[in-house]
Image: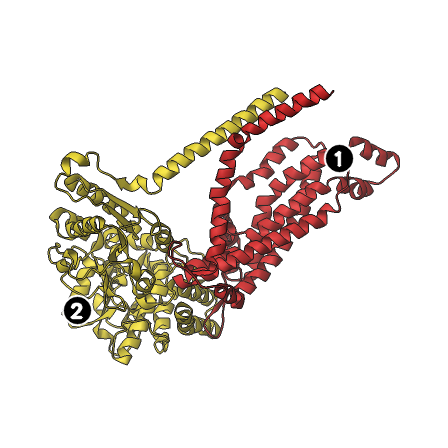
Amino acid sequence: MKKILAIILAMTMVMALVACGGNNSSDSASAPAESTDTGAAPAEESGSAASGSVYWLNFKPELDETAQKLAGMYTEKTGVPVKVVTAASGTYQQTLTAEIDKSNPPTLFVIGNSAGVKDWGEYAMDLTGTAIANELNTDAYNLYDEDGRLVSIGYCYECYGIIVNPDLIEKAGHSMDELKNFEGLKAVAEDIHARAAELGFDAFSASDMDDSSSWRFTGHMANLEYVYEEREAGAVWTECPATITGNYMDNYKNLFDLCINNSTVEPSTLATGGHDAENEFKTGKAAFFVNGSWEYAAVSGDVPNATMIPYYCGVAGEEKAGLNCGTENCWAVNADVSAEDQQATIDFMVWLVSDPEAAELMVEQLGILPYKNAPASTNGFLNDAARYTADGCYVMDWATNYQPNVDTYRAGLVAALNQYCADQSDANWDAVKTAFVDGWAAQYKAANG
Amino acid sequence: MSKKLRRDNSMIRQTRMWSPLFMGPVVAAFIIGFVWPFVQGIYLSFCKFKTISKAEFIGFGNYVKAFQDASFTHAFWYTALFAVTSLVFINVLAFAVAYALTQGIKGSNLYRTVFFMPNLIGGIVLGYIWSMIFDGVLSRYGTSILLESKYGFWGLIILMCWQQIGYMMIIYIAGLQAVPEDMLEAAKIDGATKWQTLFKVTIPNVMPSITICMFLSLTNGFKLFDQNLALTAGQPYIIQPDGSTINTTEMLALNIYNTFYGSNAAARGTAQAKAVIFFILVAAIGLIQLNYTRKREVQQ
């Protein structure tokens, strides 16, 4: 008996060791190398290619598949090794911190907003006058540091607002023409919600407050407050203001209340989340879905007529509002890698936005590329944005990109909104206001103090 | 006699010659995986840095900031309360289960296996599973584990008990089985009641197990991170009038993590200083506790 036990134990130990060893080897293989495309036979093909290599640290999980494919295509064509690593959702900062210090750091990474420039600007080379900068057709999405160096350039731009299913609106006996301001939106949403049982669908899809969804409200919807502050002051922000006034908090509340109280789910269940808002919209269970242009590919198959309307929130003159257009997708090239790698990276970037086949794939996934030789977008929501602009509506810029210590700031806002959703009292809304307005000042101080 | 001794000595010497070969890999792994990062970590706590290769020495500034941070103080007291509460619950329950399963109940091996199993699941997974379980119940009452600090606290206690009791139980079973039969028999003959036997004979004899279990559960309680992150991530927050927040269920390790990544990169030194303070704290508390319970162990 003892012998058998001893043998079993010994075997377990060996198994454990083997398993560890196995794990280690696969770990080390899978960490960066899994996504490596080093090119099977670079020697023969790359006679003319530069000697550098490209390591692209991507922050958008949705883009990963396309990016890997593009990397493979580029390597096949030129022999230049391209490695693409995508940080898991919400861990880009962590991944960048770890990767940038390695002996083979990313040559191409993302600096998406002014806080990013502050943190990572010194690691980025000045892109002024480079081939990729010359490909741009607008300067609107570029980020400069304090010394005026061009540290990162936009590679696509996006828009967000309220996605609407016009078919359901009509089925409920309303028309899209009613959705021209907050009163109209409110009337339609409340009517649909009141008759949800009879209609078989509800107004808004779930407004979950878990990490996978809360950014739609603490990041995007919050933008309306910032934008109207900017408009009140008469100038767009060019850097993070130390304080905000919160003058348009009531408007934020208008729209937020409408979303949570005329929805497929009870407001008190939003804190934990776990509902599938996108699916509710796709399957026709909800007529409204607060999200952005990147959802077009996902929803247009099921809701081909899906269209996007601005954040109507009860501000005077909002009939002239457009969608929220901007980007956090900005490329920076590592200043600390060799000149060959920098050159190879810039060549790769130019190829991504100008090669017919590659740019087509990029446009399909990302929407509009602000480059001279990129194909036109097929994204319906971005076309909506262009239509609003053509009609003379004002664009709501992404002031939300200036949120100081963004993760901490938004976490505070989520906590306050959770309490408010569970019990919509004035006291709880005051806490939301505090987190929104004073939280901004506190985080600004923490970030700059 | 002396010849044998000499032969033994030469054998020992020969074995010693080989010791670097056998010790080497472990020592190397220990230095690479622990000693070097630890030393570097202490150095970084005196620096301003974004990435560790570009660190700039600034002296004690980080420590000053760490001690001034109200959220760190809150996290400390919350963690201490949690560690002590979980220590009591885990050890009392684990001992009770171990005691029950050494009484010769049918199928006790099966029970032991089942009780041990939760320990094999990772903390993050457990945290998410339990958050679903708790919210499944709490949502019937229109609330959530993210809305009340007390739910978060007791939720974490339940989770940790569920995970750790099985592990501690194994240690207690080993201890209980080592209690000499003759002592128990002598107690019985002397007419001791079951309770008297338990408190006067059994427990003093399992003190070594109690020492190690208390040490483990106390330090585990202080070091807790995954479960805390997955279950509540510090929610609910109390929003202070100045806009700052007190993350009511945030424990020390999570506070350090949030300081490191949540704020701007300039706060990384502060997070590092907090981590060093955290180490000293856990080491000191662990050692004091070890010393205290060791004194109560009986020599057999």
Chain containing mark 1: B
Indicate the quadrant containing the N terminus of chain A: top left, top right, bottom left or bottom right.
Answer: top right
Residue A127: quadrant of the picture: bottom left
Residue B188, percent across and down? 85, 35
Describe residue A284's horizontal placement relative to residue B223 as left or right.
Answer: left
Q: Which mark's residue is nearer the viewer, 1 or 2?
A: 1
Q: Dot 1, crowdedness within 10 Å: few (<14), some or many (≥20)? A: some
Q: Quadrant of the C terminus of chain A?
A: bottom left
Give the vertical position of A330 relative to A360 (above or below): below
Q: Where is mark 2, residue-wise? A: A389
Mark 2 is surrounded, within 10 Å at the Cα level, by few (under 14), some (14 to 19) or many (20 or more) other residues, namely: some
| Residue shown at the point (28%, 56%) measured from the top left | A110
Q: Give the colour in which the image draws chain A.
A: yellow
Judge whether A346 appears above or below B176 on screen: below
Secondary structure beneath dot 1 equals loop
* Residue that appears at 67% across and 48% down: B290
- What colour denotes chain B? red
Quarter of the view holding residue A121:
bottom left
Residue A260 in sight: yes
Q: Residue B279, how many percent across, how many down?
A: 55, 54
State whether discs 1 and 2 lie on one chain.
no
Name the foreground residue: A252 vs B202.
Answer: B202
| B182 displayed left or right of A21 | right
Q: Which residue is mark 1?
A: B179
Say which of A382 and A371 sits in front: A371
C-alpha gap between disc 1 and disc 2? 83 Å
CB within 8 Å, label 1 to label 2: no
> Residue B82 lies in what quarter of the image?
bottom right
